[in-house]
Amino acid sequence: MTNERHRPLLEGKKALVSGIANEHSIAYGCAKAFRELGAELAITYTGEKTRTYVEPLVRELGAPIFMPLDVTRPEDIRAVFNEIERQWGQLDLFVHSIAWAPKEDPQGGLLDSSPEGFGQAMDISCHSFVRMARQAARLMKDGGSMFTMSYYGANKVVANYNLMGPVKAALEACARYLAYELGPRHIRVHALSPGPLKTRAGSGLKDFDLLLADAAERAPLGELVDIMDVGFTCAFLATPYARRLSGETMYIDGGVHIMA
């Protein structure tokens, strides 16, 4: 008989991970960590070009649910959660790792951002978490955990982060308010704040290589984090070991955020 103490901590849990673009994505690190701890996965992709990169990862992870998701289309969000309900009946874990802004807006300063670009960035990078959380919560019948991805630039000025700073600050506030609203339903909500990583999203920032070098130099641990550092932190927060934690912004940056 299997010793209960040696069962994977997330065995039997059902997890939706959105935002995987390729093998370098933070969301992929979260999906790998969840799978290693025993969870079953549903994975989404944005568009056919992205599907080319994500489909091999889905096969590797053995995810039974793999669907397109454009968060600007309400029908896409409904379809994803309806399929989860059809196949699984409920959901335990939800990772939102989606951020986007028109390229010209992050490349310029906040003063130069367009109303349209700022609005799109806020809608896709922030409010889409709220829209998806609403659907996820109705399927978290026995409680659950939700996660979204932020960055240090939400709380301190980071050169060249520009309009994404205010957008991520709003996202962190949304996570706290959702933690408050969903707490009575035993649903915990966290924002994760990784240090700079070599992801497709990060490469869109001006002088991103300088940001990476500066983080590595300033980190008390003396090195950059990787996607699995983020993934295993996310997985830990999803386990019973973190059952009394909610509403946190969890920094995973080798200690960079404590430095002046």
Image: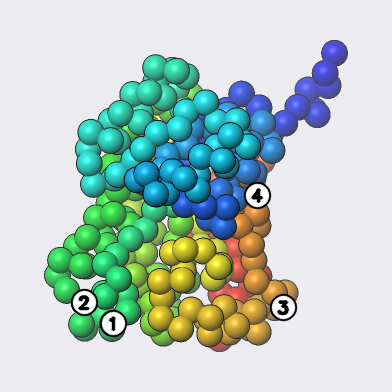
- Name the residue: 35% across, 31% down: 80
Label 3: few (<14), some or many (≥20) within 10 Å?
A: few
- Mark 1 or mark 4, whichever is nearer to me: 1
Q: At which x and y percent is residue 203?
A: 46, 71
Q: In the picture shown, does residue 190 fall above or below 117?
A: above
Dots 2, 1 in contact, CB < 8 A: yes
Q: Nearer the viewer, mark 2 or mark 3?
A: 2
Whether pointer 3 and pointer 1 mark residues with C-beta atoms closer than 8 Å, the reply is no
Q: Earlier in the sequence, mark 2 or mark 1?
A: 1
The coloring applied to the image is rainbow
Asked whether the viewer can see residue 242, the reply is: no
Q: CA distance from mark 3 to mark 4?
A: 20 Å
* Quarter of the image that includes the N terminus: top right
The answer to which of marks 3 and 4 sits earlier in the sequence is 3
Amino acid carrying mark 3 in the image: Gly
> Badge 4 local density, few (<14 within 10 Å), some, or many (20+)?
some
Q: Is residue 224 left or right of residue 173?
A: right
Q: Which mark is residue 113?
A: 2
Quick check: marks 2 and 3 in contact, CB under 8 Å?
A: no
The answer to which of marks 2 and 3 sits earlier in the sequence is 2
Q: CA distance from mark 4 to mark 2?
A: 35 Å
| Residue type beneath disc 4 | Phe
Alpha carbons under labels 2 and 1: distance apart: 7 Å
Query: x, y (%) of residue 45?
Result: 41, 43
Provide the residue designation for mark 3: 222
- Seen in the picture, residue 171 relative to 197 is either above or below; the reply is above
Q: Earlier in the sequence, mark 4 or mark 2?
A: 2
Tell me the residue at 30%/28% (across/down).
79
Pointer 4 residue = 232
Task: Identify the secondary structure beneath mark 4.
Answer: helix
Residue identified by numbered label 1: 108
